[in-house]
Amino acid sequence: VRLVESGGGLVQAGGSLRLSCEASGSIFSINTMGWYRQAPGKQRELVATVASGSTPNYADSVKGRFTISRDNAKNTVDLQMNSLKPEDTAVYYCQATVKVRWGMPSYNYWGQGTQVTVSS
């Protein structure tokens, strides 16, 4: 299973970016897909996740500014980030909980990360 992210970059405070992630490989089903981030010197933290058939879950720090969307048919998850702040600067990682075969347990997979830098 491979997760490939795209869409990071440099943006001024108040601007917007959209991150995309596609899961590929041997996939039977995907339960949760989401985004995490890790700033320098800090632990990786949840940004937003969405489980299959459920409503999205957001970190308090991004509620009202970020929107996660998922396309189950394409195994993709996007993160629309608006009103970006310098404190949103981090490496953003895509995550998916994947079952590769019926009857097997699900495992967490991660993308390689994409840098988001917000200048003040």
Image (cartoon, grey):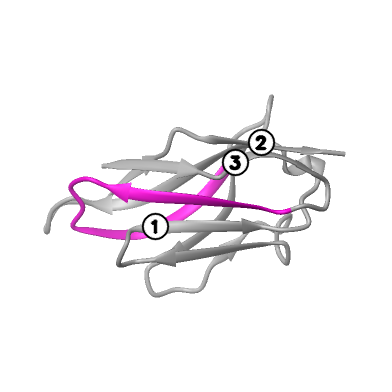
Question: Of marks 3 and 1, which one's residue comes earlier in the chain?
Answer: 3
Q: Which residue is mark 1?
A: 76
Q: Which residue is mark 2?
A: 90
The correct choice, above or below, for 101 with respect to 87 in the image is below
Q: Quadrant of residue 73?
A: bottom left
How many other residues sit within 10 Å of disc 2, few (<14), some (14-19) or many (≥20)?
many
What residue is rendered at 34% in x and 66% in y?
72
Please identify the quadrant where the N terminus is shown: top left
Instruction: Tell me if residue 69 is in the magenta stretch.
Output: no
Q: Tell me where residue 104 appears, x and y as whole percent.
A: 15, 52
Check if mark 1's residue and mark 2's residue have beta carbons within 8 Å.
no
Q: Tell me where residue 3 appears, x and y as whole percent.
A: 36, 42
**Image: magenta residue range:** 16-36
Q: Nearer the viewer, residue 38 or 24?
A: 24
Q: Quadrant of residue 57?
A: bottom right
Q: Which residue is mark 3?
A: 8
Q: Amino acid at mark 2?
A: Ala
